Amino acid sequence: MRTEDLLAAIATGLWRWDNASGRVTLDAEAARLLGLPAAPVELTEAAVRSRFHPVDFAEINGIVQLAVAEKTLAEARLRIVDERGRVQRIVRSRSRPRTVDGGFELVGTLQEVPEPQPGTSAAHTPITGDWRRSREAFLLDAGRGLAEARSTAEVLRVAAGLSMPGFMPDGLAVFGIEGDRLSVIGHHGHHADDERPFVAMTRETEYPAAEVIRTGRAIYLPTPEDYSRRYPATWPLAARFRRTSWAFLPLVNAGRTIGAWMAAFAQPVAFTPDERSVLTTVARMLAQALARAGVQEEQQELALGLQRSMMPTVQPDIPGMTVAARYVPTGGGLEVGGDWYDMIPLPSGRIALVIGDVQGHDVRAAGLMGQLRIALRAYASEGHHPDAVLSRASRFLAGINETEFRGHGEDQRFATCLYIEVDPATGLLDIARAGHPDPAIRMSDGTMLVRPTAGGLPLGIVPDTDYPTTRFVLEPGETMMVCTDGLIETGGHDLETGWARLRDIIEAHEPGEDDEGLERLADALVQAVHGPPSHHTTGPLVDRREDDIAVLLLRREGDSCAIGTGGLLTPQPVRRTVLSVAQAEPERIAEARRQVRDVLHDWADPDQVDSAVLMVSEMVTNVLLHTDGDALLVAEITGERGTRRIRVDVADSSDELPHRRCPGELASSGRGLLLLELLAGAWGVDPRGDGKSTWFELYEDAGDAAGPLSSESGPSA
């Protein structure tokens, strides 16, 4: 019997579609199935297209391209329609394509099919265009989810959550390659130890995933019989999972097979061309997502390793003090930059705290930061004072700029730095500053003040630069915060609005006496700048000016106390600020006014605040005009709120006491003592062994004030 007669007996027709010439040849049975007279015929592609549902015919090209790529059969279910577009029957096309010049040639069979049988994936797959629209929506969602995944774990979570249209895998596994062996990158629908038998396999193992990696071709196993027949050696490993269908697809990225993806199904799957197309598309997206996540994880690991090698851990055992630190990269590129902090044990038994920022956010900045950090540790360990440490560091960085950057035509780099020598026993701080933001102090009553310190140019700009030293005491119960400008300015803030944002966080947060309290404060500061709340507290600048962040917190344990009734110790809130104004720095008079206003930020009477600022300005100006020394300002608030007292002392090294003058109406000086008499609750001048101190007091409860005519008023002997 001829093949044509045998096919006609089973109601199966033959067709040949030559895509290059646009001609389709049908035998008699194929013509009948298409609703034409039952006789052999050759038609144009357009004539045949009119017999198929337009949505179905549009899918043929995609199915054929998939079959050409996989070297498999092109199989599709097609709706046959009449001249009015009404569906007459459903036929299955099974064809083997081959490429020819200018297109492809499709040779195969057409056979009428009944309704799908229950219990198969095809039973849940509509024949109309709704399934295809559902597939397109699924692939868009899958592509979006995989594109947004930033780690291998996220990629695997997205893949496990994919709800494929018409069929859903019961188990997933992603295999990688380590040398000549398979590795299990991740899996879903299995127990934790289920991957053990599969990780020892070599590429030559007769296992579907190994074959897929060797050949780069997908493997579809619709039934357990297919699996056990093709892979009898490894079938027992798969049989215990009680799945009924399996698909193994290559993960190909940039033309290279990087692994294999297994999708296992609890229900039978026929792996129709539509289903294979979905699986193939997901495998391609999965491969790209895994490759992208792998690159990002390698870069992140490189960045973290680099940062860990350069960023020390703080010492938790400083007697009488607690320390916390944070470093947050900007999030761009390799996530490394030039910010750093350090703690250095000194020969004297003291501790040096260092924080700095090398210009730039790249690997070069990170490398330069590492060199500068080592140099600073060396100079500090030699026992140099803070000013000498920074002077040597500036010379060191200037030398690198001269020999490495300028010689290669690169822009020179500079660095800001804050170097603090801490005496844990007394709380004494000696600070040298090179173009860096000032430290901030959270006082024992919760008030935050930015502590002005003398400073010089950033490191590396001028080889021989002087760095004056500022000294003050960290009182018991106070916390010092030093940070890089990223903590202040991230989120579009400038220095003013940035410090205001940090002040709200610091004053609202009670660090407590334990280490955890200080750690919580460090987290709160970073969260306020980098967390979701930061997007609701943007600054006045248009851009967010993202930058690396380094922050270091130092708390001196204990609280200020005073003797209460019955001899019991009760907390006595104290707020104090100290500021020195040198003869060569008259511009710091404005800083003195600002410090006094900050200390009095919650004072009850705004007029008294203005009076205090005016008197401080007069007292400091008098020292600079009428003596040859510097002025030392100490402002201290004591007492309970509502009945507090502020005392301001301005000390100088001159033995000459101020005397009252009678300035004329247009005189520009001689009003200092008159202002003290008019505005102060009490004031005086106290001689000291090395000079004198002019002071005044104001009282929050005006009824308890001494008043201008008090016996305390006037110069004291």
Image (tube, rainbow, N blue to C red):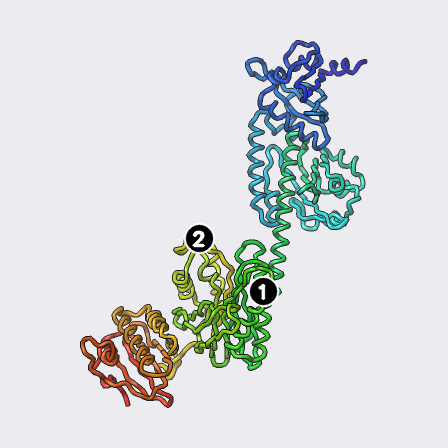
Q: Identify the residue under disc 1.
A: 368
Q: Nearer the viewer, mark 2 or mark 1?
A: 1
Q: Is residue 316 visible?
A: no
* Residue type marked 1: Leu
Position of the N terminus by quadrant: top right
Q: Residue at x 56, y 45 (%)?
A: 148
Position of the C terminus by quadrant: bottom left
Q: Residue at x 31, y 87 (%)?
A: 686
Image side of residue 230 versus residue 348, left or right: right
Image side of residue 319 versus residue 266, left or right: left
Label 2 element class: loop
Q: Is residue 187 visible?
A: yes
The picture quadrant where one finds residue 162 is top right
Q: Earlier in the sequence, mark 2 or mark 1?
A: 1
The picture quadrant where one finds residue 119 is top right
Q: Identify the residue under disc 2.
A: 543
- CA gap between label 2 and label 1 equals 27 Å
Residue 255: x %, y % from top left: 69, 41
